[in-house]
Image: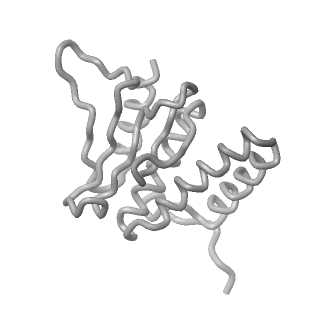
């Protein structure tokens, strides 16, 4: 039976999505030195996600898809072994820390200093993700959009 090219949003990337990402990495490499660096960084982020435990990998894949579709100006890379997304200045804006990294009970989405989430004198910069849903996806898209405003 042929491999399915679709999957539910909660289960991670489909085979077609994985193939598209590999193709995009090849396109970036073909652009030359700068493109090759971006392709290698993208591949490193995808590899970091692929090494996660299955439940973390599914979350990491959905986070990756949400961030890259919401903020195409951010570039994926790894940061301390975690998938992270950098701005045009090369500064990490947001990173995904899977629960298996430090054996915690939940994964987190962590915003760094370049993220403009400021609300007065105190604001959250780390968000626990226990389970994927449309509500979680919408919240991440909103946070990333705000962080870049």
Residue depicted at x 47% and y 30%: 91
Quadrant (top left/top right/bottom left/bottom right) for the N terminus: bottom right
Residue 56, image x, y percentages:
36, 62
**In this picture, residue 121 sits left or right of residue 40:** left
Work out whether residue 127 or residue 39 is closer to the camera in this orientation and state it: 39
Report the colour scheme.
one colour
Work out whether residue 107 or residue 145 is closer to the camera in this orientation and state it: 107
Residue furthest bottom as drawn = 1
Residue 87, image x, y percentages:
53, 29
Position of residue 101 relative to residue 116, above or below, is: below
**In this picture, residue 15 sits left or right of residue 24:** left
Residue 111, image x, y percentages:
34, 34
Residue depicted at x 60% and y 49%: 42
**In this picture, residue 64 sits left or right of residue 3:** left
Position of residue 74 relative to residue 119, above or below, is: below
Quadrant of residue 119 within the rendered picture? top left
The image shows a total of numbered marks equal to 0
Residue depicted at x 19% and y 60%: 105
Residue 84, image x, y percentages:
45, 44
Work out whether residue 130 or residue 32 is closer to the camera in this orientation and state it: 32
Residue depicted at x 29% and y 48%: 108
Quadrant of residue 10 within the rendered picture? bottom left
Quadrant (top left/top right/bottom left/bottom right) for the C terminus: top left
């Amino acid at each position: 039976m042929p491999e399915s090219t679709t999957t539910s949003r909660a289960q991670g990337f489909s085979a077609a999505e994985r193939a598209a990402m590999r193709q995009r990495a090849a396109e970036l490499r073909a652009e030359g030195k700068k493109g090759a660096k971006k392709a290698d960084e993208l591949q490193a982020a995808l590899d970091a996600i692929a090494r996660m435990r299955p439940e973390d990998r599914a979350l990491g894949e959905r986070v990756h898809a949400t961030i890259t579709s919401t903020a195409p100006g951010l570039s994926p890379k790894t940061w301390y072994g975690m998938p992270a997304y950098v701005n045009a200045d090369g500064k990490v804006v947001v990173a995904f820390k899977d629960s298996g990294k430090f054996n915690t009970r939940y994964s987190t989405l962590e915003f760094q200093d370049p993220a403009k989430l400021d609300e007065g004198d105190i604001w959250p910069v780390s968000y626990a993700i226990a389970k994927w849903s449309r509500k979680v996806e919408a919240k991440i898209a909103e946070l990333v959009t705000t962080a870049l405003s």
